[in-house]
Amino acid sequence: MSAPPLVIDLDGTLLRSDILIESGFTFIKENPTRLLAPFRWLLNGKASLKSQLAESTKLDVTVLPYDQEVIELVRQERAGGRQIILATASHEIYANQIAEHLGLFDQVFATNDSTNLSKQNKRDLLVEKFGEKGFDYAGNSHDDLPAWSAARKAYLVNPEAGVVSKAGEIADVEHIVYSRPRQIKAWIKALRIHQWVKNLLLFVPLFASHQIGDINLLMNGAMAFLFFGLCASSVYLLNDLLDLEDDRHHSSKRNRPLASGALPLKSGLLLFPALLLTAFVGAWFVLPWKFTVALFVYY
């Protein structure tokens, strides 16, 4: 008896990235005067947002950070005669381009102009096409739990926190892939912590005025050093999110944590405003207001 189809999720599974975030930042970079347009599109639902972005923004799918362990798994299963399906919440324009580029899929299911193929929608479509327990499914996130619940076997790829235990409760977990590099080293690199050294210039006035022994001034200097560093790291993350595709075409920048997929784009999307807010709120409440103005000019 032949094995049932193997269904592969895209974002976070086959791809160490997120097409919605990629296309969103690419659109903003190319159309800075239309910054609010994606928010207006979202009012009509995620399917509308993804459709508008896909029609407005081109992505070079040849340089996206594909997970080589997943690709190898797909190739092995395909070589054994198994049917391989790509099922993704990303828009069908991008999904079809990726499928054509890789040449590994027999069929593609994706978000279209009217349906966001995520969570229960994806589960219902797969059951309609292959039947309950009539397919195996590879995914990574909490959004994949409905699909796993209807699958014969579950494959987990770099699962999000809490996914392993929840998937184990509702599905027969066949295999877990851990292919992302260590997160701590990647974050240190992404935040450019080594660049904080330049902010030691803040202490030069204390040395020049022979006030380095003043504890209050020294503490203010330390706080200023911290807030400048947080602000700078926020800018680095935002810059990396806006330059994903450009970085991937560069011989060395393609190894940056966000561009290479070493870090999830969702984490960068959440962290860059958090760092910026911490820097400015901290500066406003802890240091003289003139420092906040200087920090704003620096930003």
Image (spheres, rainbow, N blue to C red):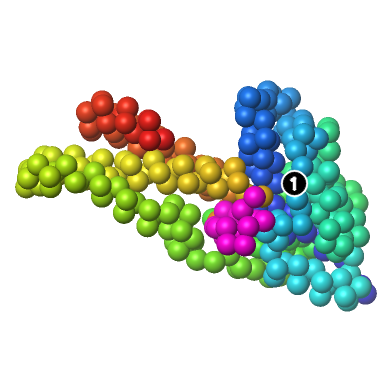
Tell whether 283 sits left or right of 185: left
* Residue bearing the label numbered 1: 59
- Which image quarter: residue 173? bottom right
Compared to residue 93, the image places residue 295 above or below, namely above
In magenta stretch: residue 104: no
Residue in the image at 76% along x and 67% along y: 71
Residue in the image at 9% along x and 42% along y: 209
Q: Amino acid at mark 1?
A: Leu
Quadrant holding the C terminus: top left
Residue in the image at 48% along x and 46% along y: 236
User: Whole-percent x and y of residue 159?
Assistant: 61, 59
- Which image quarter: residue 210? top left
User: Whole-percent x and y of residue 257?
Assistant: 54, 57
Quadrant holding the N terminus: bottom right
Tell whether 209 sits left or right of 233: left
- The part of the chain drawn in magenta is 246-262
* Residue placed most toward the observer, 272 or 126: 272
Tell whether 81 sits left or right of 64: right
Compared to residue 4, the image places residue 206 above or below, namely above
- Which image quarter: residue 21? top right
In magenta stretch: residue 260: yes
Disc 1, SS = loop
User: Whole-percent x and y of residue 115?
Assistant: 81, 36
Residue in the image at 79% along x and 63% along y: 136
* Residue placed most toward the observer, 216 or 169: 216
